[in-house]
Image (cartoon, rainbow, N blue to C red):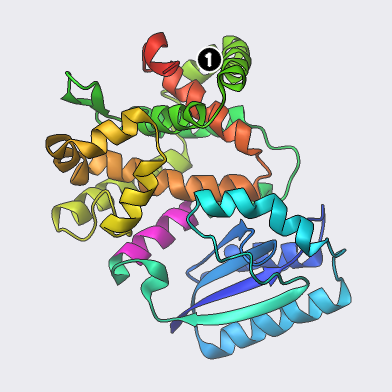
Amino acid sequence: MNFYEMNIYINEVDNHPIYSSIRTLLEGESIVSLKKSFENGLHLTVFGWFTHSQISQISAEFNSLLIAHPTEKYDEEAFQNKYKKVAEIAVKENVLEEVHQNKVLLTKRKDFYNFQNEEQLQIYMKINQIFDRWFVNSYWSKDNHILSITKDMVPFWSYLPDTVLSKEHALYSNGFVSHLSHYLGLLHSLSEKNKQAIVERFNHAAENDRESLIESLDKDNTLTQELKMMFQEIKDAVNRDVLNFHSPHDDAHIEKKVETSSKRHQLAMGIPELSKLILKDAVLITNRWILNVLYEKLVLLNIKPLDKFYMNYLLSSIRFKKEEVYG
């Protein structure tokens, strides 16, 4: 078997026959998953291990469905302008040079899918499949709500060990600190006026949501049980030097990202003693790997970017002091 990536360049529609075919694929026995992105045009990506025969048959089926049910084309120049800033933030400036629509492109990947080794790729796929099993029937739905998703996840974040890495620099290792970092990163990117508007909006919404979230702290479910086992697997991989906090990126990529991050993040990564603690911290590494995949699934669940940051704020607010959450 080989690792394949199949990009299905399809405009956003409420229903499409391809969705049913993808669901069937995700619910099968194959090691396969799904994400949605904007690179080179709006598309769904089916990725995983297939035989040549399997992927040829799937690709032919999806091509036929797209020919029979093409989606309405969008203006390519307007699309490039819309996603230009997103591409810059993601350090993917070249992904808008060519835009595809109503097309299926298949690639056999021999580079561990941009991971540093095959075990990292296997961990990434396992996390993807955990979320797929839980969310597959909700993909593409417009009825998903970020509070419900946050309540599904909170027993896992509260399960992770809570440690003070540096009291002087308020550096913590727990299931909530990455949410705080991402929320503060949002505030860092806003003007003072917009920052205040977001703080007020989130704080008002949290007055109604925080209590029900706290009530869900101990309500374990299949999703969080599987993620707990994933934490143990990641911790073992960290101990064996299979991955670290920077994985799968090199130092140059991390340095470029840190340059545009919040002062809090720059401080943590800029002090050698703190950076060394973070590099091998299994909890922080687990946060990063699981959140990166969850964020990809939120796109499939039609969760708006601002709602994702509300999740970060809401989770931060039940663990950290008010002055820490407000940055």
Depth check: 266 or 321 in front? 266
Residue placed furthest toward the left: 273
Depth check: 124 or 183 in front? 183
- Across and down, in percent, residue 77 comes to 77, 61
Secondary structure mostly taken by the magenta-highlighted segment of the chain? helix
* Quarter of the rendering containing residue 145: top right
Name above or below for residue 100 compared with residue 51.
Answer: above
* Quarter of the rendering containing residue 156: top left
Work out whether residue 109 can be spotted: yes
Position of the N terminus by quadrant? bottom left
- Across and down, in percent, residue 238 comes to 19, 52
Q: Residue at x 42, y 10 (%)?
A: 322
Label 1, secondary structure: give it: helix
Magenta-tinted stretch: 120-131
Q: Which residue is mark 1?
A: 210
Residue 129 magenta-highlighted = yes
Depth check: 296 or 188 in front? 188
> What's under tag 1, amino acid-wise?
Arg
Q: Residue at x 87, y 63 (%)?
A: 72
Query: Is residue 57 toward the left or the right of residue 34 in the image?
Result: right
Crowd band around label 1 with a 10 angstrom C-alpha radius: few (<14), some (14–19), many (20+): some
Marks counted in the figure total: 1
Q: Residue at x 54, y 81 (%)?
A: 107
Query: Is residue 198 toward the left or the right of residue 269 in the image?
Result: right
Depth check: 104 or 197 in front? 197
Residue placed furthest toward the bottom: 53
- Across and down, in percent, residue 144 comes to 69, 37
Work out whether residue 226 can be spotted: no
- Across and down, in percent, residue 223 comes to 47, 42
Residue 79 magenta-highlighted = no
Position of the C terminus by quadrant? top left
